[in-house]
Image: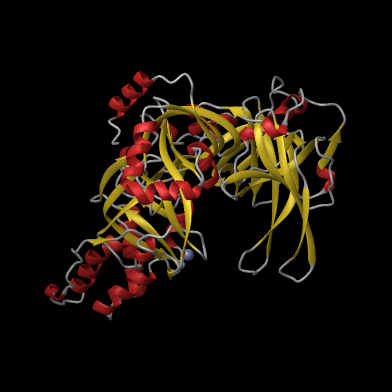
Amino acid sequence: MHAQYIIIDVGDNMTIDGKYVMQVSAVKQECPEADENEISEEFRRYEEEFLIPPEDALRSVIRKFQLASGKESNALPTPQRVEKKVNRFSELNSDDKNVTIEVAVITYTPRIQMVRGEEKQIAFGWIEDNPWEESSNRVRWDFKDWGQHSEHLSPNSVVRLEGVSVNEWNDKKSININRSTRVTVLREGNTSTIQLSNEPVNIAKISENEGFGSTIGRIISVKQDVIIKKDGSGKIDVFRGRIADSTGSIGFLSWVPFNFEEGNLIKMSNISVRKFRDTPEINVSNDSKIEIYRDNEFPLIEDLEHTTKSNISELRNGMRDISITVQIQSWEQRKFTSEDGSERIVRSGDVVDPSGRCRLTAWCDFNPEIGSFIKMSNSRVQFWQGSPDLVVDNSDQIEEISTAPWDSIDPDNHWVDVNIDELVKGGSRRGIKTSGTIVSVRKDSGIIHRCSECRRVLRDDLCSEHGDVKGIEDLRLRFVLDSGVSNASLLLSKEPSENFLNKKFDEIKKQISVSGSDGFITSLRGDLLSRKVEIQGRALIDEQGTMILAEKMDISTNSVPDDANNVIEKWGVIL
Ligand SMILES: [Zn+2]
């Protein structure tokens, strides 16, 4: 792949006082008479001229100063050859070398360093530990690649790194990937998404992945905002806004003063795209460059407003500045005492549009009539029980509209048809109807016991959190549903299970006590495997895959067992 690189001059950054403090003190232990500045200079030389990180240069530097002082060189400390295998960054110390860890590569940005007029490539980016877990369970660190491993460090890939070292500077630890590091790709990434170029790309493209890049867009909105630091140490002034082109719109967050206004067409260079929850957002920092861009053909703001309009099926956790029209299905208000002791009211209800259903929460005095239509602007999305829900904070974000924007929806029977293939590619949704073939009946279907404290399922009569508790009986059915292309786990809780089996809990319990749980599973398999079913419910989609929580399941009347058997054969599903 031919790439354009960002050329930077890092000369000054490399001599920041104190950068090599740890290594200098290690050398001083061995060679107390050596001059600190000279030691520091030696590390700088290794790093800048030979691209050898200070951790790896340590032995050579100690040797140099020992020789200079006429000391025997056999007094050298034994090098750390022992491999340290860890699962989490938190297990690492600042002087660890020869570390083995599996990580997810989030970004990979090559840079050319000019060294004595010669171009040398290094790269930096973000990696996350615990790569097989969802991102809320991961920790993100910076890394530097000194060994030109770009081929094996694509964004979105999961790799095993063997022989990396830890670097610590200003209390912040990072990973050095060295020339000798072995990189094994465990899951392929997306090679086409490496953002090497500073050529602007359209907004749909820049929203695809986290990383660095440039784009051109018209400012749809911009306002000043403050971010309150979590540790209570103060506030940061920021600007938030949204830019759009004909391919879509994306929010931005500027950490530096932002002197442009609504309607301006701007080029944003050297910006980073990061995900806030599930939503990509442009971050503008000191390194970024924002300038007015001239293009008479570029769509006007009126022509771009549609890019900020959403429907319910498109909502994703973390979205902001959403314009959306919905119909109110139910509404209630609840008083509660907030943390500061004051009484607050939260209002919420179910809302629908032709694409689905979600909840709406209003933190303002808003009391709509059931069935009325409302248009919201600048609303935001937050997750509630795994589904994206709309939130409005001020009544001026809400407008009641008198004419129906669509043929009336019967909210009690509003299920939007989505096939599994489409479902797994999108975000979590409520109010969906789908169908597929049951290719597996999970063995843990049937009567289970839950913890009376936290409702977790007990294993060997123990709760993983609360230990030995009195279990509460519950019923559930678990399946794998397949479309032939995609699959999803399918879960029926007690009531839908009773309805589907057309038996009450006590009858099912009796059946299981007679036939045993294996017998129960065997009979379920006999009845259901290869059968096509229709489901109404909601879908939770995350890194773990797709889970459908059925409120209702029916055996499809036009079942095609042959197709199902083909599916089972093709995918080698274990029954
Ligand atoms: Zn528990």
In the displayed structure, 74 sits above or below 527; it is: below
Q: Residue at x 29, y 42 (%)?
A: 185
Residue 572 visible in the snapshot: yes
Taking the image as shown, residue 401 lies to the left or right of residue 515, namely right
In the displayed structure, 93 sits above or below 449; it is: below
Q: Residue at x 27, y 62 (%)?
A: 97
**Location of residue 228 by image quarter:** bottom right
Name the residue at the bottom extreme.
32
In the displayed structure, 421 sits above or below 56; it is: above
Q: Position of residue 565 (x, y in %)?
A: 32, 23
Residue 140 visible in the snapshot: no
| Colour basis | secondary structure
Report the number of discs.
0
Q: Residue at x 38, y 54 (%)?
A: 130
Quadrant housing the C terminus: top left
**Location of residue 399 by image quarter:** top right
Q: Residue at x 26, y 66 (%)?
A: 58
Q: Position of residue 210 (x, y in %)?
A: 50, 42
Asked whether 265 or 130 is in front, the reply is 130
Asked whether 242 or 503 is in front, the reply is 503
Q: Position of residue 138 (x, y in %)?
A: 44, 55
Asked whether 97 or 379 is in front, the reply is 379
Taking the image as shown, residue 327 lies to the left or right of residue 179, namely right
Q: Position of residue 314 (x, y in %)?
A: 62, 34
Quadrant housing the N terminus: top left
Asked whether 376 or 73 is in front, the reply is 376
